[in-house]
Image (cartoon, rainbow, N blue to C red):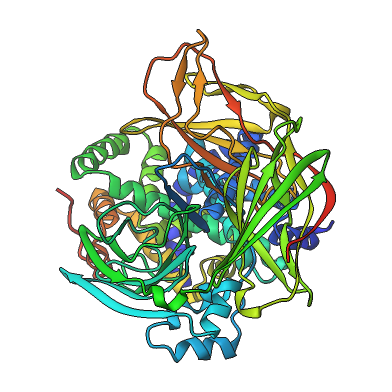
Amino acid sequence: MDKEECAAAAIRGDETALLQRIDIDKQQMYGIAYSYMRNETDALEAIQETVCRVWAKRHTLREPKYFTTWMIRILIRVCMDARKKRAREQSVEALVQKHEKVAAAYDAADRLDITAQVQALPDNLRMVITLKYYRDMTITEIAELLEKPDGTIRTWLNKGLKLLRTDMTVLEEGMQDERGNRERLEAGQPKAAK
Amino acid sequence: MSAEIENDLKRDNQRLQNDKNQIVQEIEQLPVELLNEAIQKGLEQGKRRASRGRRKRLSLSMSISAVCIMLVITAFVRVSPAFANMVKDIPGFSGFVEFIQSDKSLLSAVENEFIQPINLSAEKNGFKFTVDGILADDQRLVILYTAEGSGINGNTGFLKYELKTGDGADVEASIMSSHYPSQDDADSSVPIHDYLDILMGDGIPMPERIQFSLLLGEEWLKVEFPIDHERFAGMREDISIDQHFEVGGQRFTVKNAIITPLQVSLTFEADPNNDKHANHFINMALVDEKGRRYETNTGFGDLNPSLTRHFKSSYFERPKKLTLVADGLHLSDRNLSITVDTDKMETISSPQNKLKLISKEQTAEGYELKFDLEELDETNKYLVYTLFKHDGTFKDASGNSHPILGNSGTSAEWGTGDSKITYYYRIPKADYKQPLTFDIEQYPGYVMEPVRVPIK
């Protein structure tokens, strides 16, 4: 079976074909999940959830040839949702604690610093940065995966880089944004989380 | 814009690049086995999630100890436009088109104006519960109802209900309902049309009145309605048959038949000397002289010793001849058992390793054990087996017997297209000496051998 036949059989409910088809993309999936989640456990969890949704929603994929794009879209959604879910579960105290940890890390090591900063970005900006700089995708490829115009991706990229470039104030702003205060961020009025 | 990004990038390039290099190195240490495991687990999880899609609920309230059987119905329901129009003309019934059309008995009953419109409602705190109408005869009662209110929609799931006769006694019957999740949003409020299908126990008369309570939100809403017995007076045919037949080396007798507008019931008896445990006839139906088939999905009792099967009704078709047909028999060996360790959550042994203990959950009364019956083929997957005897017991490693809790019969769940069925059994909470052994009543297995018995 070639890739497409395999995908077609998978859509019809052939489990073996589905596993075969996923096998082709699994490294790419792990790469994206790991780059975004930044640890093995969360990356594997995201992949498990993705495969679960792939099976449950397989009937919604009309064209077998778009299997990879379709599955990676699901993965991206899962990764972004996982973080939202976690943010909801965290209390304000936990966020403050995290903030302190991040602040300590900021001085300790440059890499940790940028890791923490990327992680503190709003979901969409973090995903765009991840795909562009950690997965070497083009703007067009990212635009297709996120189903947004190229211009939007460029704007997000720009915004993400701006946030990464600056100091703790912006980092804190990013964390604030995690709790949903997007307007403030878009209006460009940095405000520190307390 | 692009130039600006490039400038930004230059400034951050090194930091990002370093971080990226590190990440890429980490990704290269791909944990292949864990990754494959995650994919496999995802698939299993997906199958479970998909199987949540379609559920059927069956509850039994019987003062007598009875076992109810039910076949998995997987037929896709197609609604013909002509029929949809006809039902739409009856006020309040448009929401029930699919359900009525899926059942040949109800379909011909509706076509013969056998519906009793009720249209009684109860309202409380913004919730409304309406009994739109009923179909009733000597053996069967179908209640069509509508529930609406804040947060009630096609995904609310099964609503809790209570069914009593006019004088407050339990309704001794097998009560069924199905639930199909819809596209409704989780928080939306969309009226739902649902039904209860009530098959009265053998010899139990149809009540004169019904008190039907439904739990909506936090509110119990009750509607009491009469059943007009005049509508089905004299519409009953009792036939004595006493015909013997043999299948898979096992002997049976068809005792008698009752034909009413909503149902045909046939009573079977198995020969006590049969060496196997007869579980079920395969593709059993009644066929008339014009080749019309009347299927059977439910029944009371089991073939050891006596079983009543319910068929779709031929009442309004008035056929001259009826023949009982079947393609074979589901049967299993006697004296089978499964041994499990509910502490270590292991299945130590089960016949052909098809039955597995998969989870244990603590409930108010004790533990709920879930068993998966796997590797079911096309012939044996459409049957809900009475795995463990009704009101049965199990033995711990010291040989002491403990009760299996609940008298609600077999509780099972399955998904369309699954090759397994999940069974639920509850046991008391206790510190058991492991392992535990459960005797198996019915188990997958069959012979294909045609059956033909003239009924009428």
Question: Can residue A23 be seen at all in this image of the molecule?
Answer: no
**Relative to residue B92, is residue A148 drawn left or right?**
right
Q: Is residue B117 visible?
A: yes
Q: Is residue A185 left or right of residue B337?
A: left
Can you say whether B257 is above or below B328 in the image? below
Residue closest to the eye, B394 or A166: B394
In the image, taking residue B278 as reference, residue B388 lies left or right, namely left
- Please state if A183 lies on the left or on the right of B241 as rendered: left
On-image quarter of the N terminus of chain B: bottom left
Give how far across and how far down residue B10 sits, in percent: 46, 56
Q: Residue at x 33, y 31 (%)?
A: B365
Residue farthest along the top direction in this orientation: B398
Kindly identify the residue that appears in the image at 19 percent across and 45 percent down: A92
Q: Quadrant of residue A98?
A: top left
The percent coordinates of residue A131 (x first, y second) are 53, 57
Residue A67 or B404: which is nearer the viewer? Answer: B404
Q: Quadrant of the C terminus of chain B?
A: bottom right
Q: Quadrant of residue A183?
A: bottom left
Q: Position of residue B124 (x, y in %)?
A: 16, 68
- Establish if B299 lies above or below A142: above
- Asked whether B33 or B236 is in front, the reply is B236
